[in-house]
Structure formats: structure tokens, C-alpha cells
Image (spheres, helix red, strand yellow):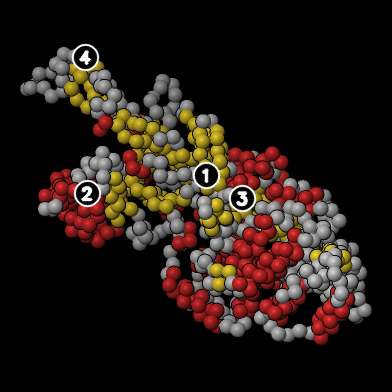
């Protein structure tokens, strides 16, 4: 290797040739006593001098201090060459930070693991999640010693490998004239506090954990201690996902007799870069946008068919359940986060699945965790408040905060299985995390606020057997304040239908006959190179890219969409038997988020009538609807949860929703059946002359299923009834409008298959 002075000159020359504007900006900053980072790309260094980059990677302990010296030389050179240098100030504490960029380290898998002992003393890049943050401290990294005999003084630096301990020398180390040896006693010099500020630096330790999505099945993610100093101190919080560059070192505590030495690997950080979750995976964003534009251009005029291709790509191993798959997509995409007058309104959608065992709830959670680039999957059994939010732990005599599941999932997805198994006193801890998207901590003298800006996808079993005549809070054993924070609640009930069992068994046996290549294509982590499939299911990688790009759209609400959401919210509030847990102002915010998510899913920048109608349909398909979709099993039924004609299916949903809300003039289609016209005429005649504003009660009856009917509903809302032998019916109490007219036909008996009384 070349001489140190030559290396400093070479680095200074590169900085002056390619980073002169950055050096000038550094000199214009105030407060020369502060620490300032000067970020330089190591791959750029490699393009200018490959040998220097290799030396930096191979011997960083020697080269990194030379970069700081070279930056000081470059600053002095700029000051000497600048005539108007009166406002420029030399920064003695500027540090060169060598940033990581991809294509220099193209292997993303290799940087996601904890380094081994073979990499000690090497330059290392690691991607991980911050799980613990220590308290910032002041480190005295140099100490002054004096000889009592010759009065000579010298400084010794602390040893990082010995946990920053400074060993007291046994003999005088001052410079002596000639070969004369001083045998004086060595003592530490007591300095006045503040007289040697250069001997102190800011110091902090954090713990970095391997990304959970990169860890193999059944493997516990490992973690490593990271030492941060100077300007890097207090820049990260628990839950942050970062790219870290630094030097791998070994650290050991003082040796003791008859005790095995405790040696640990650590990383001394040189640069920290936060991971952008939406752009974590390297792909050509412009090419993907063109592919998705081509996809929607192909389905122009038949947008619902294109949307259903995306929807069918969700959990392809689960048969049917299109309504839940669509709702899951909307929850993953989410709405637009708003911050109005200091009041933050979340954009994340929360979803709860309630149902019998074996109905696919956990499979949905695991597929969603696999689909989202940043996800945390946990179970409610044994989870405590500290496990979900954060915990205060004591290590080495100091208290540290360790992030829980919700904090680790910041800007991502948190899947909680067996949600009902969480202890009641621990459930209240996630109220703030779900609505305000923060966790306020006051533990062991540590007071702070951590972000939990994540989507919560939870699954639980009902308390005992699901009973339609019981309140939702009783069925799921969850309090109203917690239930009101979920945008969507779906109930999956296994009624043991013969037709449903036959369809599912045929589907599962069909999956068993698929080849390994077909299964690998559906769950491939790599997007196909030939573009986006137009008429077939998307691989999981393509679906992940689409959700990432769609989430960047910020759609605005159109006036017709606002009218639909406002009218539906008013009807919900005026219903007699409304659920107090669902019909709060949060319902309106949920409708806005769902309509924005559907507009994003449809690749649109404006929320139209279609998006508002589907937002209402998703709420109606879950728990707490007012019966606008009575007669439609396709959105609500597990056994018949499929549809072939997407456009006709949407037209039927739009007709029922807009007629129920008496907003037919907003319809995007003009097709109306004669039966609907006759029903509307009868309703108008019955309501004529009605001056009061009563709440209209609709008694319902039960009819036999027509031939080839999928049978009774398995995904029903609160208030529905069913025996398992035919389609269940709903007893609905729906408010009338200002003229005394009901949103649907008064006194009409409707079964879930859409046959009114007298029809066959």
C-alpha cells in the first residue's frame, strides 16, 4: 500500500475534482464546533480510483481516518482559492461518510445477514431493523497522563475493542533524549471540565436485527450491536429500517481469572441510510408504470374485469372469497394520509377477520405478510403490551427501549393472528397505535413517542359459536373502542354446505395436480421479464410492485363520490339497531379511505362513483351494513364467493346501492329491470302523503334455494339469520328519507338470493 501522505493527497484531489460544490456548501455552514457529515459514494470513488476503493474495502481501519484528513486538506485548499472567503468557516469536525449504493453491492441477500468472524476488520454493508436504541452518552476517547519524575505528558486513545477502556501505562512513555530510560511513576492528569473538548465525543449503541422477511423458515433473526459516534448519534429510532456501512470489530471485556473471555462482534458505523419501503426493491419504475398503463389500456371500457384479474391473484391457493380478497387489497393499498391544522388523520386501513377454524384466516395473514415489503407477523397468544408496543430492558446497568411488533412494522404491515387471545389489559395499549399511529412511552425514566404508521390485519375466532342475534362485541369478545378502529370486519362462518364442500374439494384436488413450475410461477419473488400478464393471474412480485406504485397516487374525492359517502353515513347513523362500535365518525373516515384505496387500485387519480359504490359495498359485505346488498350472496358468501361476469356483478351492486340511497341519478349505467321499476313505483305510491319520518322496519321471510344455488351465506353481517338449509334472510331497520320514503321498497320481503315474496 502507498504512503499515508500520498493517499491523503489522492483523496483530496478526488474530492476537489468531483465534490467541490459540496465542500463549498460545507464551509458556508455555521457553528464550526459541530460535527458535520460529508457523504461520498464509495462506488463513485471506485470509478475514479479502483485501487483506492479496494484499499478502503480491505483495510478500512487505516483508510477511514485518512479520508477525514483529506477533507480537511480540501477545505483549506478551497479557502485559499476563494477570494470572498470571509463568510466561509473551516470545519475541523467534518467527517467523510462513505455511502452504500447498489450496483456496488448487487447481492441484496448477502447484506441482510449478520457478519461473521472472518469479516473482522473489513468494510461491511448491512441492511436491518433497529430493535434497540441506547441512551446517548459523552465518551472521553483520549486521556492525558503525566510522569511524576520527568514531568512529561502524553495522550492515549481508548480502545474500541475493549469497550472504550484506556489502559494505564506501566512506565513513562514521554519522549526522552537519547537512550535514557525514565522509571518515574505514571499518573492521570486531572483536567478542568470543559478544558479539553476535543477529547470527548458523542457516543451511542444500537442493536440492528436482520430483516425478518429475509430469514429462512424456522430461523430466529440474529442481531448485532452497532456503535454510532458524533453526527450519527440519535438519528435512528426503534423500528427504523436502515442500510448501515461500517467496520466489523471484535469487542471483549476485561479478562478475569478462571473465566471464559466474552468476545462479541460489533460494527462501528460510518454511514446510515434509511430504507424507502416503496422503493426497497430495485426495479425500473418507469418501465413498470408503462406496463401497468398498457394493462389498463387493454381493459379500457371493462375496468372491472381488469381489477378482478388483480384481485384473483391474491391468495391463489384459497378458493373463492372474492369479497375478502378485494377488501384485503384495499387494506394493503390504504388511503391518503392527511394532516389538517395539526390534526393527523391516518391513511392506513385496518381489517379484522372473524370466523370458524379452517376458513383460511391465517392463510390470508401469511399471504399479506409475504406480499408487503415490510411486514411483521405475530400471534396474540402470549403477546403482552411490551411485545406489541415497546419494552424497557436493562443491559449493562442502563435502560434501553426495545421495539415491539407495531413499532417494527412502521410504514408497513402488522399481522396479528389469534387477536382475541390478547389479554384485555394489553388490548388497550394498541388503541393509540391504531388510530393516532403513535406509541407514547414512559418507562424506567425514558419518555418518548414512537411511530406505528402501519396497517393492522388481525384474525380471531368468535367466542364460542357465532350467533346472529348477539351483538358483535359479545360474539368476538372485543370492546367497542377497539372494534371502531377497524375499517373492515368480515365474518367467515363454516356452515357445512354440500355444494360448497364439493367446490372446495375439487379446487384443492386441482391444486395437487399442478406441476411444480406452475406453483412456483404464482409465488415467484421475481417479476416476469416479459411484462404484466393481461389475462392471467399476476405473480406475487408483480402484485407487490403494483401495490407499491399504486400507493403513491393521491386521488381526490369528486362531488358525486362525496354525496354517496355522505348519504350512506347518514343512513347508518339513523338506523335503529345500529352498532355503536361501527357507526361513529370513524365510519365516514373509513369510507373515504376505502374509496381512495379503490381508486388507487383502479390506477386513477380521482375517486369516482365506482370507487364510492365499492367502498359502500365492502362495508356492507362485512359487519354492520344496513342491507343495501340484500339478495347478493356473491360479495358476502364464502360458499358462492365467486362471480364470472365482473361488469354485470358491478352493475348489480351499483343499482342496489344507489337505489337504496335514492341516488339513482348518479348511476354510471342506465340499465334498470322492470321489476325494479315496478318496485319503485309501488314504494312511491305507498309513501305518498306520508308526513312523518318513521323508521321503516322490514320483516323478511325465508325461501327455498333455486336450482344450482350456492346455498346460504357463510359470510354474514350482524343481524342476519340462517339455518344452513337455505339462504338466510336479514331483518333490517332502515331509516326513511326526508319525504318519508324508505331507501328501498317498504314492507318487501327479500331473501339473500334476491327473490322477493311471491317470486319463484
Structural crowding at the residue carrying mark 3, measured as other residues with C-alpha within 10 Å and reported as few (<14), some (14–19) or many (≥20): many
Q: Which residue is mark 2?
A: 27
The quarter in which the C terminus is drawn is bottom right
Nearer-the-camera pick, 476 or 227: 476
> In the rendered view, does 198 fall on the left or right side of 666?
left
**What whole-number distance in Å separates the C-alpha atoms at marks 2 and 3?**
45 Å
Q: Which residue is mark 1?
A: 450
Q: How many marks?
A: 4
Q: Are marks 4 and 1 in contact (CB under 8 Å)?
A: no
**What whole-number distance in Å separates the C-alpha atoms at marks 3 and 4?**
64 Å
Mark 4: which secondary structure? loop
Would residue 498 be seen by someone viewing this image from the given angle?
no
Q: x, y (%) of residue 573?
A: 75, 60
Which circle's residue, 4 or 1, is located before the other in the chain? 4
Q: Which residue is mark 4?
A: 185
Structural crowding at the residue carrying mark 2, measured as other residues with C-alpha within 10 Å and reported as few (<14), some (14–19) or many (≥20): many
Q: Quadrant of residue 538?
A: bottom right
> In the rendered view, does 179 fall on the left or right side of 689?
left
> In the rendered view, does 268 fall on the left or right side of 663?
left
Q: Nearer the viewer, mark 3 or mark 4?
A: 3
Nearer-the-camera pick, 7 or 414: 414
Amino acid at each position: 500500500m502507498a504512503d499515508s501522505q500520498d493517499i491523503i493527497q489522492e483523496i483530496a484531489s478526488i474530492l476537489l475534482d468531483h465534490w467541490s460544490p459540496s465542500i463549498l456548501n460545507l464551509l458556508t455552514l455555521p457553528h464550526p464546533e459541530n460535527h458535520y457529515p460529508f457523504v461520498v459514494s464509495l462506488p463513485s470513488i471506485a470509478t475514479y480510483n479502483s485501487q483506492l476503493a479496494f484499499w478502503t474495502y480491505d483495510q478500512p481501519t487505516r483508510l477511514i481516518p485518512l479520508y477525514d484528513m483529506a477533507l480537511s486538506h480540501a477545505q483549506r485548499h478551497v479557502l485559499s482559492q476563494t477570494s470572498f472567503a470571509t463568510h466561509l468557516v473551516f470545519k475541523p469536525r467534518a467527517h467523510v461518510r462513505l455511502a452504500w449504493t447498489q450496483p456496488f453491492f448487487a447481492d441484496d441477500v448477502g447484506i441482510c445477514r449478520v457478519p461473521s468472524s472472518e469479516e473482522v476488520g473489513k468494510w461491511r454493508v448491512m441492511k436491518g431493523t433497529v430493535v434497540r436504541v441506547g441512551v446517548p452518552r459523552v465518551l472521553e476517547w483520549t486521556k492525558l497522563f503525566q510522569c511524576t519524575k520527568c514531568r512529561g505528558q502524553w495522550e492515549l486513545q481508548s480502545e474500541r475493542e475493549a469497550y472504550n477502556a484506556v489502559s494505564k501505562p506501566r512506565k513513562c512513555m514521554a519522549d526522552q533524549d537519547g537512550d535514557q530510560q525514565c522509571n518515574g511513576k505514571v499518573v492521570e492528569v486531572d483536567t478542568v471540565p470543559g478544558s479539553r473538548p476535543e477529547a470527548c465525543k458523542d457516543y451511542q449503541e444500537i442493536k440492528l436485527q436482520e430483516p425478518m422477511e429475509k430469514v429462512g423458515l424456522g430461523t430466529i433473526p440474529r442481531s448485532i450491536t452497532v456503535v454510532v459516534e458524533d453526527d450519527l448519534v440519535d438519528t435512528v429510532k426503534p423500528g427504523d429500517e436502515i442500510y448501515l456501512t461500517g467496520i466489523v470489530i471484535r469487542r471483549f471485556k476485561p479478562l478475569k481469572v478462571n473465566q471464559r473471555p466474552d468476545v462479541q462482534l460489533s460494527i462501528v458505523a460510518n454511514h446510515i441510510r434509511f430504507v424507502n419501503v416503496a422503493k426497497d426493491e430495485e426495479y425500473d419504475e418507469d418501465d413498470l408504470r408503462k406496463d401497468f398503463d398498457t394493462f389498463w389500456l387493454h381493459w379500457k371500457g371493462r375496468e372491472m374485469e381488469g381489477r378482478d384479474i388483480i384481485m384473483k391473484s391474491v391468495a391463489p391457493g384459497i378458493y373463492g372469497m372474492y369479497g375478502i380478497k378485494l377488501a384485503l387489497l384495499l387494506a394493503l393499498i390504504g388511503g391518503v394520509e392527511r394532516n389538517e391544522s395539526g390534526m393527523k388523520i391516518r391513511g392506513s386501513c385496518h381489517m379484522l377477520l372473524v370466523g370458524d377454524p379452517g376458513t383460511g384466516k391465517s392463510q390470508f395473514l401469511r399471504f399479506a405478510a409475504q406480499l408487503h415489503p415490510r411486514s411483521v407477523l405475530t400471534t396474540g397468544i402470549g403477546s403482552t403490551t411490551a411485545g406489541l408496543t415497546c419494552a424497557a430492558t436493562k443491559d449493562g446497568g442502563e435502560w434501553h427501549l426495545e421495539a415491539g411488533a407495531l413499532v417494527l412494522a412502521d410504514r408497513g404491515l402488522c399481522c396479528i393472528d389469534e387477536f382475541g387471545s390478547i389479554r384485555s389489559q394489553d388490548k388497550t395499549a394498541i388503541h393509540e397505535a391504531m388510530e393516532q399511529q403513535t406509541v407514547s412511552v414512559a418507562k424506567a425514566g425514558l419518555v418518548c413517542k414512537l411511530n406505528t404508521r402501519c396497517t393492522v390485519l388481525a384474525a380471531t375466532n368468535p367466542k364460542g359459536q357465532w350467533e346472529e342475534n348477539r351483538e358483535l362485541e359479545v360474539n368476538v369478545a372485543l370492546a367497542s373502542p377497539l372494534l371502531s378502529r377497524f375499517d373492515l370486519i368480515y365474518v367467515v362462518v363454516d356452515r357445512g354446505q354440500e355444494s360448497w364442500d364439493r367446490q372446495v374439494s375439487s379446487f384443492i384436488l386441482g391444486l395437487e395436480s399442478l406441476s411444480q413450475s406452475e406453483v412456483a410461477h404464482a409465488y415467484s419473488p421475481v417479476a416476469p421479464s416479459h411484462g404484466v400478464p393481461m389475462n392471467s393471474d399476476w405473480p406475487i412480485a408483480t402484485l407487490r410492485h403494483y401495490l407499491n406504485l399504486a400507493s403513491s397516487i393521491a386521488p381526490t374525492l369528486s362531488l358525486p363520490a362525496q354525496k354517496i359517502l355522505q348519504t350512506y353515513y347518514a343512513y347508518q347513523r339513523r338506523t335503529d339497531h345500529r352498532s355503536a362500535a361501527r357507526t361513529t365518525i370513524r365510519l365516514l373516515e373509513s369510507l373515504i379511505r376505502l374509496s381512495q384505496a379503490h381508486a388507487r387500485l383502479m390506477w386513477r387519480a380521482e375517486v369516482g362513483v365506482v370507487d364510492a359504490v365499492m367502498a359502500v359495498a365492502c362495508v356492507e359485505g362485512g359487519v354492520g351494513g344496513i342491507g343495501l346488498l340484500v339478495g347478493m350472496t356473491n360479495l358476502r358468501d364464502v360458499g358462492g364467493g365467486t362471480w364470472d361476469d365482473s361488469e354485470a356483478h358491478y352493475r348489480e351492486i351499483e343499482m342496489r346501492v344507489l337505489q337504496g340511497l335514492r341516488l339513482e341519478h348518479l348511476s354510471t349505467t342506465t340499465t334498470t329491470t322492470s321489476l325494479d321499476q315496478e318496485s319503485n313505483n309501488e314504494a312511491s305510491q305507498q309513501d305518498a302523503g306520508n308526513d312523518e319520518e318513521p323508521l321503516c322496519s322490514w320483516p323478511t321471510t325465508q325461501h327455498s334455494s333455486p336450482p344450482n344455488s350456492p346455498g346460504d351465506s357463510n359470510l354474514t353481517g350482524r343481524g342476519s339469520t340462517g339455518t344452513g338449509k337455505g339462504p338466510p334472510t336479514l331483518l333490517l331497520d332502515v331509516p326513511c328519507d326526508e319525504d318519508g320514503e324508505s331507501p328501498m321498497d317498504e314492507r318487501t320481503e327479500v331473501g339473500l338470493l334476491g327473490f322477493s315474496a311471491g317470486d319463484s
